[in-house]
Each structure stands twice: as C-alpha cells, then as structure tokens.
Image (cartoon, rainbow, N blue to C red):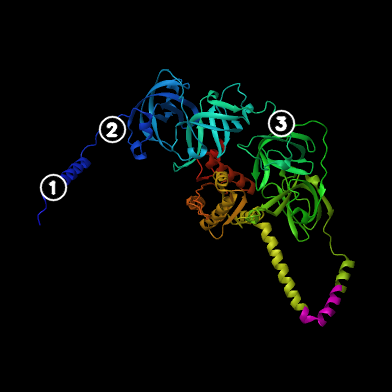
Amino acid sequence: MRLPRRYGAFFALVLISAAVVAQGSHGPQAPLRTLVTAQEAHSLTIEEAKRAYPVHLRAVATYYDPNIDPRHGALFVCDPTGCIFIRIPNAALDTTPDLPAGALVDIVGVTAVGDYAPILINPTIRVIGQSHLPEQAQKTTLTHMLSGTLDGQWVEIDGVVRSVRLTAWNAILEIAGNDGSISAVTLRQTGTDYEAMIDSRVRLRGNAAPVFNRKFQMVGARLFFPTLRELTVLEAPPSDPYAMEVLPISSLLLYRPGLDLVRRVHVQGRVTLQWPGRLLCIQQQSEGLCMTTSLPAQVGTGNLVDILGFPAISEFKATLEDIALRPAGGSALQPIAKPITASQIFQGDHDGELVVIEGELIDQDRATGDLTLMLRSGDSRFLAILPKESMAPGQLIWKDGSLLRLTGICSVQIDPDAATLGVASVRPVMVRILLRSRGDVELLRSPSWWTTRNVAGILLAVVAMAFAAFAWIVVLRRRVRQQTQALRESEERLRHLSEHDALTNLPNRILLNDRFSVALQRAERFHEGMGLLMVDVDRFKDVNDTYGHHAGDKVLCELAKRIRHSVRLTDTVARLGGDEFIILLPDLHTRDEAQTIAAKVVASVAAPFNIGNEQSPIHVTVSVGVCTYPEAGLTIENLLRHVDDAMYNVKAHGRNGFQVYQPAEMQSR
C-alpha cells in the first residue's frame, strides 16, 4: 500500500528529529546560562538547582544575621522579581561587608539546594549603595505561608503579640493570627523594651522562611524582619494593662459577638497553689483557675494577685497562657477549703477549687518525682499529687490502708468521647487533688491489727452465717456467684480506669511507672539493656485549630494504634497526656533496636490520617526522643529527663524524626 506524499514527509521529519535528540543526548551539554534575577534562581527545580547555575544579582538586603544559624550566616535579598536566601559560610563572615537593611548589593554566586528550596551559596558580595526595603509586601496568613509558595518572599502579616523571648542576638515575637501563631525573628536592639509590645495588634513585614525536618520537608513557617521599623502597631496595648477591667473567671471563653483576635485579659484572685515553674492556681470567690507557667514563686499562698494572660483551652477547660502577674496588695487571706465527697468531685462542678476530701490510701508512687497517692472513697477512686519539692528523696510517709484527709485543688480530667451531637457536654473520668505541701495531708486513722474482740465477733458471725448457709445453701450459692462476678467486673473496671488513658485506652502514668520499675529492676539484676522513647506530636495544636478537637481526638486514637503496631508485644506504650506518649522497651540487646523501633514509629505516623466525616486526610508528624539503659542513666528520673531532652532536640532541629540521647550534644543544646 502506498502512502500519500504528505505522510511520507511527516515520517521523515519525525526520523530527523529523533536523530537530533539522540545526538544531543550523547553529545556535550551546553554551558549553563547566568541567572540575573532572584525569581529565576528561586524558581529552579531541585534537580536544576543542584547543577550550580551561575548567578549575578543586583538586589536589596532585607535581612542579614551572622548568628542565627551555627552552620552559616543568613542573608535575604530582594530585587523587583522576588527574593531569595543566601548562605554565607562561617569562614567568610569576617570578610563579609556590613549589610544593613536596605543596602544595595551586587552579588555573584551559584545555585544550590537549601534546607527546603533553591538558594545561593559561595557568594561574593559588594555593597554599591543604599536603597530601601521593598515598598510592596504580599498580604498573607500562616495558612498561606505553610503552603511553601511564599518561601523567602517579602510578606506582610497581622496579628497580636502573645509573648517575647530574647536570646543573646535575637528577639523572637510570637504573633497570633486568626489561623494560628508564628514566630517572628529580628536582630535584638539594645535598650528596646520588647515586653511592652505584648498584647499589641501589629502589622509586620519580613521574609517568609520554612521550618523543616531532616527530610527537607516543610513542617512550619516563621518570619525574619530586620528592625522594628518593619513593625507597625495597629492597636497599642493598654498603657497599664493591670488597669484593665477585672474579669470574672467564669466569663473566660464565653461567646462574644464580633470577637476577632483573642486579646489579653485581666483576672484577679487569691493564690491557692504554687508549683514554682510549673503550675499556678487562684480562686476568685467560688471560681477556681489553674494555669501552667514557667514563673518562679513570687507571692505566698493566700495573697491577692493580678494576672494578665491570653484565654485558651486546656483539656476542655478554660485557662490563661503566657501569663504575667503582680501582687495586688493587702494582707494574705487563706481561702476556705470546701468539704466535698468523692461522688461530688466526679460531678465536675468543683474543678479548680480548693476542697477537702477524705479517702483510704490504697497505693502510692513517686517514680516521676512527684508523689502520687491513689485513694478510695466508697466505689470511687481518685488521685492526689504532692510535688517533689515537698518530699525528701525516697520518703513515703503514710502506710497503705490509712484514712487521710486531703486539702488541695480539685483537677478534673474529662472524657472527650462523652460529647454528643446536640448536647456537646463532657463528663469527668478521673479526678486529681493537687496538694501544696505535706501539711495538706492529715492522717485520720492508721491501719490496725486484728483485736481479740474483732476476731470473736467475726467468728460468731461466721458461725451464724454457716447455719444460715446450711438452710439456704442453694439460693446463697447462686447469689454469691452473681455478686462475686459483679464485684470482680466492677473492680476490674475501676482498676482499668485508674491505669489507662480514657481517650486512647493506653496505659497511663500510674501503670507505666509500675512497669518501668519492674523493667529497671530486671535490667539491673540480669545486666540487660532497656530503652525509652518519648513521642510528641509536632504542632498538634494546628490540627485542633484547623479540624476541631473531635478530629484531633480521633487522630490521637489512630496514632496510638499505629504506635502499638510499630513496637514489640513485650513493649509498653503509654500516654502521658495531651499529645505526648512514652514507649518502654525492656530486654534490649543493642541500642540499635531502640533506634529501629523509633524509625518505625516515625514512618507509621507519616501516613495520612483518614478520620471520616468527609474531611480531607490529616497529615501529622512526630518528634521522638530515644535513650537507653544504662548509657543514658541508671534511674527512672534520669532516663525520663534524658529522653525528654532528646525529644526536644529533635524539635529544635526540624521535628519529624528521632534523636538518641547523647550527653555532650544535649548539654550543649
């Protein structure tokens, strides 16, 4: 069959093109062209950026910091097309010219792959004049920045300054917007009162930058701005925030029309509990409020204090974050503790209040430092926590079986699964009494030996019961079996509730401590290894803020399942609270086994979480600290502290990974 001429010409053209392509693939590559704009360099693919394209830019320096990263100096520059990050080697910092914000620079360098996106390296920088910072900045939000499309660009955000942290070289402002909070970093200026910026509503311009993990994946965002001239105060905080109206504690987190961004509020109350550097509780008439804080003890119990803070939710309860306080004056007046029963505290109405309650001591433990007492009152069980500062090392004062009267702060833990559609209420599942000192525990009765009178009475009762049983043997046997079974089931339910987390059904701190002690004793006796992993969900607050707390709870439950499937049958996975988990690895032969399990945990969590309800899959990552016995310590306290250090080291270096505790590295952190 003969093809028309036009088809023959077409096939000839195809063959010629193929020959040209084949020749080009085996011949020498054309020299790389010189890139002359920031957009050209930043828009390269990762593979193209690796080819080290030559770059020659004329741009404006927007942020220069030789100390922000121990690996290298950091420089952002912008030209009319966009912005890009430049890595300056430490060896070249002494010869790098002064680069104030707005300096016009001529830069020659090559492209490379940074920690997240294409950057410039090995630069030769020459200051050729003074210009100004970009006049136009893209208005953005944290959500948009987390997409990665604004990497390095000059952007503008609005928000409220929540807190300030100062280092030797930098000031870090935590800016809260409608879609979350972001850290804004600037060069520290001597003589500036950064604390005065707290609670101001601001507009800020700077270079967007990623927070990344070891796989160079973006897991967060931050902002770098050169000076406070790029910060515009839209709404100043009160000149004297303590002069603001004192709000009732009961009004926190109530509905208010037109509420935009949450601002700082002023509450007042008498101090009922202080765990320095950890927890502060106050009471305002009949309302109580507890807040986590890093502040040391500043006032005594019973003193009236003014507290400034930002309303927030903690375990389904109202609290204040980023607090500041000062004494309100007047003499100390000890709040009156309210006597209540175990059934009353489980109604949840006394959360945060100073109460008095009696119970029989059935167990006590201080593996984590604080002394944890488990008490029983009727059919109810509850915990009491005495801070480690109030106890001598290894000292246990009260014997099991003692009847105690406790005075402390009632802290209710909530069952999130109790919230139902239409009636979105929650119910208490566990109660803790937070004690201030040993003086809050009064011994009412010590356990006693059997007396002759009691023994005689019991024998008479046994004889009478034997005669009655003889007459009603069939009926009583049946009843005894039924009652015994019911008691066993009730006891098992109570035991399970006291030893397991209500949300994930994982062992809680009490059961973990018990298993931890047994594993440590076994390791010491048989000279075996033991591992400990601390797992913390990265930016879990963003999941709750974006998808809601119910979705966050489902993610925690699914995450618990994945962790259990990643460990051995002999390992213990426990939830410490919130988004923090502990994995106990007994009978380790080598430290590599712990690292293998940690890697499996990180990998299993990386898969998307499908929680149903027509929501898109949720992506979360975890930071895992790893330590082993005996390398990281010989006691429970040391192992817990060191695995916590290792986990926070992972967070400090990008999250989404694991880190084995190394004493030298952790101490230098």
Query: Mark 3 sits on what residue?
Result: 244
**Residue 380: x percent and y percent?**
75, 59
Q: Nearer the viewer, mark 3 or mark 1?
A: 1
Image vertical order of residue 97 relative to residue 290, above or below: above
Q: Residue furthest top?
A: 129
The answer to whether residue 669 shows anywhere in this view is no
Question: Please, what secondary structure does the residue beneath circle 1 have?
Answer: helix
Magenta residue span: 461-475
Q: CA distance from mark 2 to mark 1?
A: 39 Å
In terms of depth relative to the viewer, which is nearer, 43 or 118? 43
Query: Mark 1 sits on what residue?
Result: 6
Q: Residue furthest front?
A: 257
Q: Nearer the viewer, mark 2 or mark 1?
A: 1
The answer to whether residue 497 shows anywhere in this view is yes
Question: Please, what secondary structure does the residue beneath circle 2 have?
Answer: loop
Q: Amino acid at mark 3?
A: Met
Counting labels gives 3
Q: Amino acid at mark 1?
A: Arg
Question: Please, what secondary structure does the residue beneath circle 3 have?
Answer: loop
Q: Residue furthest left?
A: 2
Quarter containing the C terminus: top right
Q: CA distance from mark 2 to mark 3?
A: 64 Å
In terms of depth relative to the viewer, which is nearer, 250 or 315? 250
Residue 472: in magenta span: yes
Q: Residues within 10 Å of mark 2 (few under 14, many from 20)?
A: few
Q: Residues within 10 Å of mark 1 (few under 14, many from 20)?
A: few
Quarter containing the N terminus: bottom left
Q: Amino acid at mark 2?
A: Leu
